[in-house]
Image (cartoon, rainbow, N blue to C red):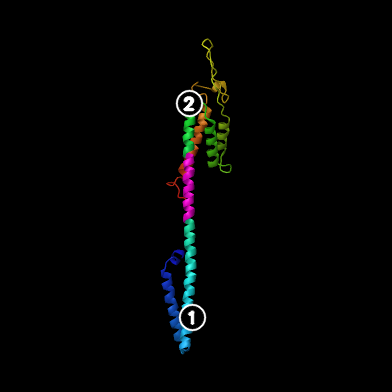
Amino acid sequence: MKQKLQSRFVHLFALIIVIALAVTTRSIWPNLTEKPTDILAFVGFWVTLYGLSVAIFEIARIGSVSDSTLRAANNSYNGLKLQMELQEVKSCQEIINSSVSELRNKKAIPVIFLSRIKHVYLSVFPGEESTEDHKQNILRLNSYEYVTTPRKSKTQAPTQIINPQYPLEKLGAKEHPYQMTIDTLNRMHDDLSRYSALKNDYKRKVV
């Protein structure tokens, strides 16, 4: 209905109806146009009625166009917001990859990396949408603590790096003393990948 009102042809349709009504009225009550003054009043009435109908249709059409413009603006805003959000997620995934690489090289994760990862992860999975696994990932990441390797003299026997996240018997290979943190970061990366796939334009249209 709103799309029909947007068409200018509605005015022509209204004009045809007004003319038809005027002709019908004159045929039923011919005495309405007996005198010149009556004819002028008769014509003036139907012209006024036509002008009123045009005004009503224009108001309805402008309202319809305004609604369409508002929907288009909302769709554009939502699309832009989604693209910015997905870019944030992608940036966070790159930071996670860098953090995992640092840990595998037995280097500390920069504090700004940890803050950024947690900020994006919590914004993507807020309290009302987060699962127990999401909460556990944050808790494990909060428990991360880098342990520096003590400097050893040439005569000192080699010592093993003790990571407070693991019991000694579960440390496993020495080259991965932070495996729990690495696993947690990998799970967070996978969670963000699934979220990005669900939100992407080729999977779901923005409404």
Q: Can I make out residue 103 in this image?
A: yes
Q: Residue at position x 46%, y 52% from top? A: 76
**Amino acid bearing label 2:** Arg
Q: Which residues are magenta?
A: 72-89
- Is label 2 in a helix, a strand or a loop? helix
Q: Which mark is residue 184?
A: none
Circle 1 packing at 10 Å, graded few (<14), some (14-19), many (20+), is few
Q: Quadrant of residue 143?
A: top right
Q: Residue at position x 46%, y 78% from top? A: 47
Q: Position of residue 161 (x, y in %)?
A: 54, 20
Q: Looking at the image, is mark 1 or mark 2 nearer the viewer?
A: 1
Q: Report the Cα–Cα distance between label 1 and label 2.
A: 88 Å
Residue 66, above or below 184: below
Q: Position of residue 200 (x, y in %)?
A: 45, 45
Residue 133, above or below 62: above
Is 88 contained in the magenta span?
Answer: yes
Residue highlighted by disc 1: 45
Residue highlighted by disc 2: 104
Is 56 contained in the magenta span?
Answer: no
- Is label 1 in a helix, a strand or a loop? helix
Q: Can I make out residue 29 in this image?
A: no
